Image (spheres, grey):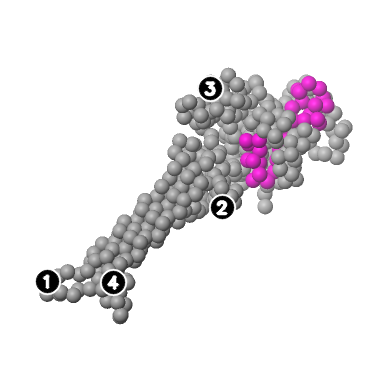
Amino acid sequence: MSPLRQLLAPRSRILGPLAFQGASIRFALKFVDQAKIYVASGHGGAGCVSFRREKYIPRGGPDGGDGGRGGDVVIEATSQKETLLRFHFNQRFLAKNGQPGRGKRQSGPDGADIILAVPPGTTVTDAETGQKLADLTALGDQYFVAKGGRGGQGNARMATSSRRAPRFAQPGEPGSDRNIILELILLANAGLVGYPNVGKSTLISKLSAARPKIADYPFTTLVPNLGVVKVDEDHSYVLADLPGLIDGAAQGAGLGRRFLKHLSRCQVLVHLLDPTRLDPDRPKRDLELIVKELKAYDPQLAKKPALIALGKMDQPEGPLALAAFQQAHPRTKIYPFSSYTGEGLEELRYAMWTKIKP
């Protein structure tokens, strides 16, 4: 099996014969949010055993230099990366070893470090123990995942008052290695949650400059989309549009479980309901099922501040569904809107901001 097909294999089990069509391949090559890699730091260089040999200085004494330090493996959050794609094609990262010391008290060169650039929001976990090692949320955050070994001391350092001509030096210290899991969790202030084809992508395209793929069939959105929603000249927030949930998402059905983790950093969730799904009571049942899926995946998600939005109010079913929902939940605030006419968008935009602002 080719490397590309191995990468896409999990998707092929979900999407069947469509898995290798263009959309799925673009998905795999565009957004990768988890990778397991092997990293190893460099060994320290050995100290040198050498003695000064110059004319007219018959007993010059030891002059062996120290070995160089082994290179470190560093993970750094940078704006230059948006996904963990590179780590699916290259999974081994080895820093350089330090060089041995030399005569005339010359230290060996240090081994070159390796800096692995990742997107902000990446967590680092030890693959063997499951211990979370770092959470790189801000640009410039660094984590030294494997420290290089120290260089050994040369025999010039081994000399003492009672041992003036040592004929030995220290070996360099070994480096360290480990398997780690990199996982990207998007940094968004608000997240849109709902069933497929309820209008999440259309909504984010109206509230921000994001331009996700929009079509009238389920699972148009195969990757998370982020958009910056402007409140006024001085304030804005990041809104995430995630692929739609289906029943059983928390247990791995559809695409849900893969992307539910991206809601963990959101300050507010927006439950987006569709009034055109079968009957006026369907939005109420959809909300109950969505909350159930969130609780099954992570009970903390269900405790986050949430807004309830009912879209497609330009459709004939909109007012009927709104009346049915308000009758079932008379004390619950609901935000009706239409992405087509623009009705209710400003109220929904500001409602999210009220939950986010400090």
**Which is nearer the N-term, disc 2 or disc 4?**
2
State which quadrant residue 309 falls in.
top right
In the image, what residue type sits under mark 3?
A: Phe
Q: Closer to the camera, 290 or 51? A: 51
Residue occupying the far top of the picture: 17
Q: Is residue 55 above or below residue 237?
A: below
CA distance separating discs 2 and 1: 57 Å
Per the image, label 4 sits on a secondary structure element best described as loop
Disc 2 or disc 4, which is closer to the eye?
A: 4
* Drawn side of residue 57 relative to residue 214, left or right: left
Residue positioned 48% across, 28% down in the render: 4
**Which is nearer the N-term, disc 2 or disc 3?**
3
In the image, what residue type sits under mark 2?
A: Leu
**Residue 74 shows in this picture:** no
Per the image, label 1 sits on a secondary structure element best described as loop
In the image, what residue type sits under mark 4?
A: Pro
In the image, what residue type sits under mark 1?
A: Lys
Residue positioned 58% across, 19% down in the render: 17
CA distance separating discs 3 and 4: 67 Å
Residue ID for mark 4: 166
State which quadrant residue 23 falls in.
top right
Magenta-drawn stretch contains 278: yes
Magenta-drawn stretch contains 229: no
**Which is nearer the N-term, disc 2 or disc 1?**
1
Residue ID for mark 1: 55
Q: Which residues are magenta?
A: 257-286
CA distance separating discs 3 and 1: 75 Å
**Which is nearer the N-term, disc 3 or disc 1?**
3
Residue ID for mark 3: 20
Image x and y of residue 287, in percent: 77, 33
Residue positioned 59% across, 34% down in the render: 225
Q: Could you say which disc has been placed on residue 133 in the image?
A: 2
